[in-house]
Amino acid sequence: MTIDIRNTILLAGAFLLLFAIGELLYHKLKVKAELSRKFVHILTGFLTMLFPPLIDNHWLVLALCSSFLLILLVSMRFGLLPSINAVNRKTVGSILYPIIVYGCYLIFNHYQNYLFYYIPILILAIADPMAELVGKSLPYGKYKVLGHTKTIMGSTAFFITATITSFVILQLNTEAAYTSTLLIATATGLVTTVAEGLGQKGYDNITIPGSAVVLLYLFIKNTDLLEVIPN
């Protein structure tokens, strides 16, 4: 058994354990589905951070993501995994999650640049649930986007979290100057905040990381930052 296959199996076991913990929270501790779903969402994002260093074969990542996509589809069809699916709104977010993870991995693998993976996925994992939690806890400054209600507090929480997340990753993984990483991080925070507002019914799981990847690509390819951001 190769190291990649072993790591893939270990990661699959970790995801299954995470799903089991989510079900325990929902059934035994009576945690609301919205919260158990957010718990699984965030921890899934952190677990997927292990894909680039532990798996060097995109086919194995495809197999891992496809298997969990199948599990999620079956669970929705037969009313399983209520800790993820029993929310009072129509959303395809959980279905799109493994798809965008594999997509970002492919881009990272092609360019051999961790930024294309870590920044989009971590923003999705951290900033997205943060916006919802803050927006519901402090529902001030309500406004409409494509017929859906958003709050200034929620959008601000997303922007701040996305900007800080991007800045930290850029500082840790590049040799760019402080001002350059602050510029890229702020732009990434702004663009992904707009993308979060436009992505409804779970489609923000595509618009958020997708917009981050496009922006990072434009910065890397069309500015002198190409020399300091590793390929």
Image: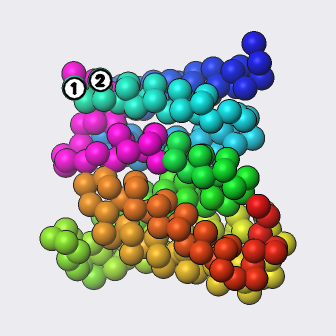
Please name whichever residue, 168 or 26, is drawn nearer the observer in this view of the structure: 168
Judged from the image, the secondary structure of the residue bearing numbered disc 2 is: helix
**Relative to 122, is 87 above or below?**
above
Residue reaching furthest to the left: 147
- The coloring applied to the image is rainbow
Compared to residue 217, the image places residue 44 above or below, namely: above
Percent position (x, y) of residue 201? Answer: 25, 55
> Residue at the spot x=55%, y=80% of the render?
187
Determine whether the residue tagged by mark 1 lies in a helix, strand or loop.
helix
Query: What residue is pinned by disc 2?
Result: 74
Give the residue type at disc 1: Arg
Residue 228: quadrant of the picture: bottom right
- Relative to 180, residue 49 above or below: above
The residue under the point 19% across, 47% down is 90
Tell which residue pokes out farthest to the right in this image: 175
Q: CA distance from mark 1 to mark 2?
A: 5 Å
The answer to whether residue 146 of the structure is visible from this angle is yes
Q: Residue at x 75, y 12 (%)?
A: 1
Q: Position of residue 85 (x, y in %)?
A: 28, 36
Q: Which mark is residue 136?
A: none
Check contact, mark 1 vs mark 2: CB within 8 A. Answer: yes
What's the residue at 71%, 19% (across, down)?
Answer: 6
Which amino acid does the dot numbered 2 rest on? Val
Classify mark 2: residues with Cα within 10 Å, few (<14), some (14-19) or many (20+).
few
Instruction: Mark 1: give few (<14), some (14-19) or many (20+) Cα within 10 Å.
Output: few
- Say which residue label 1 marks: 77
Q: Which residues are magenta?
A: 78-100
Which of 87/145 is in front? 145
